[in-house]
Image (tube, rainbow, N blue to C red):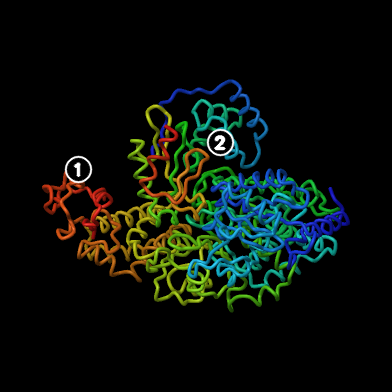
Amino acid sequence: MPNCKTVVPYRGTPEQEEELLRFVAEHKGQPGGVMPALQKTQQIFGYLPEEALILVAEGMDVPLSELYSVASFYAQFSFNPKGEHQVSVCLGTACYVKGSADVLEAVEKKLGIRTGSITRDGRFSLDATRCIGACGLAPVMTVGGDVYGRLTPDQVGAILDKYM
Amino acid sequence: MKTIDQLEQIRAEISAEMAPRFAADRAQGVERHIMVCAGTGCTSSKSLTIIERFKAELEAQGAAEHNRVVRTGCFGLCAMGPVVLVYPEGIFYSHVTPDDVPEIVSEHILKGNLVERLLHREADTGEATHHLEDMEFYKPQMRIALRNCGKIDPENIDEYLAVDGYKALTRILTEKTPAQEIIDAVKASGLRGRGGAGFSTGQKWQFAANADSEDGVKFVCCNADEGDPGAFMDRSILEGDPHSVIEAMIVAGYAIGAHQGYIYVRAEYPIAVHRLEVAIGQAKEYGLLGEDILGSGFSFDLGLRLGAGAFVCGEETALMTSIEGRRGEPRPRPPFPAVKGLFQRPTLLNNVETYANVTWILNHGADAYAAIGTEKSKGTKVFALGGKITNTGLVEVPMGTTLRTIIYDIGGGCPNGKKFKAAQTGGPSGGCIPESLIDTPIDYDSLTAIGSMMGSGGLIVMDEDNCMVDIAKFFLSFCVDESCGKCAPCRIGTKRLYDLLDKITKGEGTLQDLDTIEELCYHLKDSALCALGQTAPNPVLSTLKHFRDEYVAHVVEKRCPAGVCKDLLRYDVDPDKCKGCTLCTRICPAGAISGVLRAPHSIDHTKCVKCGACMETCRFGAISKH
């Protein structure tokens, strides 16, 4: 999965940075405080920008390399920004045996991007996710907060058109 | 902060209010409780809108005063969602949409007429069943861990109190029950860890209680990092009954001498996380968590830690490393967590479902629990039933129930008349069980004996359209992705296994490869550091054992019997059925189909990309894949 340093310029605002610094100050020195700090960073910026990670490292007095080591371990953290519309297709077992791999392929075709990347205009990003737990609706795809269940590959086009 | 008397008062008041939910019949003047499932499955199909709509509609039709809408946890029958249950009659409505709400209110709530079209219908007979307890899906079930799911509002601590919640804790704290007595009760119940490995819970508590800590600090942790794809038992318990887990953790803290607990929960479960936050907040407000609980002198605090999408963190040592804020890599055992766990202190770690059972045991007695189940596996087990099954959902059955009961009686069998092929238990660590073993009574030991494992309780059903080699490859690709990379056997071994399986699904495998796969599996089992690597070969070994003919078909005949592996597929035109309409020649993206009008067409297999577009387009069913 492409998860290297992003080419998208950093767009963090002073307010966002301030919010992050406040959180960091509260959690400095707390045992196991690194993960919550990374989760907060991602919540504020939508991904982990290098500029923000430097703030966290300095604020918590933790080497930047250690932050990178932890962040790169977990699938939830991304060094790349996500699209305006985040499309995820569930590849949990229940969805997989009901054909979600074909649904994912249809989404890739429709958006013209590979799983784990973002469209050039930054509007759509596509991920394959682990089980989201809506197994009763398998196979499942989510676009932002909207859930689409019991999908067949030929329904994908019309669904994505709504967001185009 | 509440006193014990105040808690008793809340119990009495709220259980009187909740009476319609437990009443046998509808009596004059009794109000109705409209229970709407707000678990993840039903929420995904707009159940929150349904709740709002009910409130608005009751208001509009002037019935708000005598009827209540209750948001609940999962009822279990996710395939029929969104689900609405109306008490006191106990009428079960399935596939409800927000637009159905006005009719339910005007007909059922106001006039007492059932809305027939929304009643649940049995999959086999098509007959409408009115009541939950009459449904085929619920009849063979026995709900202990899920006892409150669907019965109470999970975001209201008062409703939990009303169903005897925090009663065990109150009793233990007021009577100052000796810790050993509690541990003995858990031991006597025969409860075993519901996370998968099945270690005796009582023993675990004993080890943690016996362990010395230099500075007296110990921890109680809850493993809610339910990473098995297709498993959602723990999530449903946290969403439907978070307080039962919290109460058990406080009791565990009392029993082993710990004052701090952590729940490590998947960040992918936003609803469960929210309900836990609410529940912990309410417990603190009532003085059931924090300093000097109910004035007993015992203190216990609870914190939430969110996982970040790493399957290996479900392994106990990796989970603790992750709580410590580091890369979630496992470490060798011993020392076991009970001796040296979180932050190097003795730590008790149990799974969500295990804790949910503990509170029941404390309330009903160890003997009552030990009376359920098989000789070595006591109690019940929750399974997340998914895949090619009619009644997808959450089921809880006594240990020793056969797969046949779960799949056919409760699950309703495979949909669309397809033939059952295999059931997969234990996720990426488990194996596939073929039809010939479907009468095996399920418990920890019987599943291990047939090459699978209990795992956390995911149960995925597969029909004739699923290729077992492809399924083995799917689970391995999961393990390749999720291997943390710390030990070489898992990091390299899973990848090499995957490559070999990939070769076979592409039709390039040899019979020699099958032997190599088997050998590699056993090496991996013996040498990997943690359970992830040690169990990763299970799906491969069990499919090789029970479905070897499918592997051989891929290798020798270069054919995928289920028609799943794309590289082995062949599309052909049946010249008798083909009318020569040329539609497929135009739709084919590779230009692989040739033919003239009104003469049978043919497919050039060197050009065909196996997209299946021709088969979908053909109006005469003349194209087949095999």
The amino acid type of the residue labelled 2 equals Leu
- Which element carries disc 2, helix, strand or loop? helix
Q: Secondary structure at mark 1?
A: helix
Between B4 and B30, the one lying in front of the other is: B30
Residue drawn 21% across and 45% down?
Answer: B588
B361, above or below B328, in the image: below
Residue B178 drawn above or below residue B572:
below
- Give the number of the disc on residue B586: 1
Q: Which residue sits at x=58%, y=47%?
A: B99
Q: In the image, which disc is placed on residue B48?
A: none
**Quarter residue B56 falls in:** top right
- CA gap, disc 1 to disc 2? 52 Å
Same chain shared by disc 1 and disc 2: no
Q: Which quadrant of the structure image shows residue B242?
A: bottom right
Coordinates of residue B199 in the picture (x, y in percent): 58, 67
- The label nearer to you, 1 versus 2, is 1
Q: Which residue is mark 2?
A: A38
Q: Is residue B424 left or right of residue B509?
A: right
Cβ–Cβ below 8 Å for labels 1 and 2? no
Of B35 and B193, the residue lying toward us: B35
Task: Specify whether residue B195 is in view.
Answer: yes
Chain identifier of the residue bearing label 2 in the image: A
Residue B395 image offset from top left, x and y in percent: 56, 65
- Quadrant including the C terminus of chain B: bottom left
Mark 1 Cα within 10 Å, few/some/many (few <14, many 20+)? few
Tag 1: amino acid: Arg
- Name the spot of residue B165 as percent of width and height, x first: 75, 59
Give the image location of residue B428, x and y in percent: 44, 59
How many badges with numbers are in the image? 2
Q: Residue furthest top?
A: A14
